[in-house]
Amino acid sequence: MTVRESGALDIESIREDFPVLEREFDGTPLVYLDNAATTQTPERVIDAIVEYYETYNANVHRGLHQLSQEASIAYEEAHDRVAEFVGATGGREELVFTSNTTESENLVAYAWGLNELGPGDEVVLTEMEHHASLVTWQQIAKKTGATVRYIRVTDDGHLDMDHAKEVIGPDTAMVSVLHVSNTLGAINPVADLADLAHENDALIFVDGAQAVPNRPVDVEAIDADFYAFSGHKMAGPTGIGALYGKKAILEDMEPFNYGGDMITKVTFEDATWNDLPWKFEAGTPKIAQGIALAEAVEYLDDIGMDRIARHENELAQYAIDRLAEFDDVETYGPPAGEERGGLVSFNLESVHAHDLASILNDYAVAIRAGDHCTQPLHDKLGVAATARASFYVYNTREEIDVLIEAMDDARELFA
Ligand SMILES: Cc1ncc(COP(=O)(O)O)c(C=O)c1O
């Protein structure tokens, strides 16, 4: 049982699902607060991988033998399950398995952007964009002669929607925005941005790497043309991510990679492409990972995405409140009390973020320090690095207390 009768999460029981949380370092229990980078994996998901390799490991779509048929069915159905999880009613035809969010971005940038963009076209990003989107669209713009423009971030960590209305216009061809900021925790109004994009005949790509793991997402309610996320940030395995795309758009797009499995007919002169989504999954795909991602989605749904979002928001608010007890701590992102993703970036005045993270490691507390792949945003914030504590379904207030106490010791060490 992971949900109590009151509807609150039974965190103790959830923690038992994650073997790695039992780890201790020199007798000190691990406090894992680096979930925005990668979440831990529940036993069920690990079992799904083991079961695949122990009982039906085979290549998909190629064999007539029993193992290949079993693997093919499980792999194909995994697409349907993950599509359903994000509200894509078109099922597998609208859900491509990729390596991660970054590859989903590159898939669209290369397969759509290289063919559709040209001089005079604008790609609109935000100042809080992750490098996965920022660097990718910058380079595609350079190759095609398109221009990249940025929607401003306000001092209180929101997107400036008035500026968005100025920047998104008739020349906009693509709007690529993140749903939840991995640095600020801000939740962006992606449905409004989709409306703005569509009013201007542009497409919208939503980077959901920090949203899908943590809150209910409905790609059709958002009216996203593309929506991307990563398995390893949502209790799934590494090496797998997903790209949702509207069927009509995916059908019109050129393939991203060429090779086996993505074709229907090949001659010495030319080739024709396979049906969706296989047209975008060249070569042997990520079979075990895809099947395990579907199990992760099942696990999260059993707990309830609404509950997970509430729990993470509560932890983030608690962390902000505790950090606010100290004059020498600066936090970034939307103000306390406002709903946000389950993470807080901050700086301790006298201790560099990297030093802080390494001291916290001595207390078995795992946090992130650096630019979190948002260098331009850090430039705007006027800092080279921040420390980031990020939470998942198994984290507790007590773990945040451990973080705060360990920070006290770091302060003394550097005093
Ligand atoms: C908002 C956001 N977008 C994209 C990514 C890239 O994810 P991946 O490394 O799984 O491709 C991350 C990872 O930190 C992220 O937080």
Image: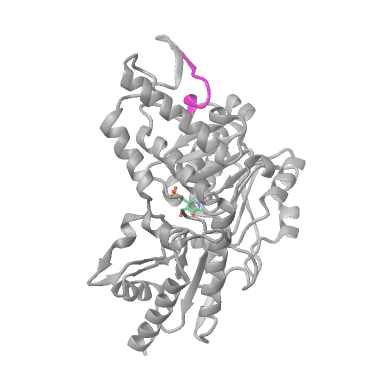
- 221 relative position to 3: left or right: right
- Up the image or down, 234 lies above or below 144; here it is below
Quarter of the image for residue 126 reads bottom right
Instruction: Tell me residue 216's x, y (percent).
Output: 59, 49
Residue 150 pos. (x, y %): 63, 55
Task: Residue at 48%, 62% (x, y): give it.
Answer: 375
Note whether 91 is above or below 392 in the view shown.
above
Residue 45, horizontal then vertical, whole percent? 38, 44
Residue 275, magenta (yes or no): yes
Which quarter of the figure is the C terminus placed in?
A: bottom left
Q: Measuring 42% from the left and 84% from the top, which residue is drawn there?
A: 350
Of residue 409 and residue 78, the one placed in the foreground of this image is 78
Residue 86 counted in the magenta span: no
Q: Is residue 238 visible?
A: no
215 left or right, relative to 361: right
Q: Which residues are magenta?
A: 270-280
Q: In the depicted view, which residue is nearer to us: 153 or 245?
A: 245
Question: Does 271 sit above or below residue 5?
Answer: above
**With respect to residue 109, does 332 lie above or below?**
below
Q: Position of residue 283 (x, y in %)?
A: 37, 26
Please tell me which residue lies in front, 387 or 406: 406
For this orientation, the residue located farthest to the front is 5
Horizontal side of 137 relative to 203 (left or right) equals: left
User: Can residue 273 be spotted in the picture?
Assistant: yes
Q: Is residue 72 left or right of residue 325?
A: left
Q: Residue at x 39, y 39 (%)?
A: 292
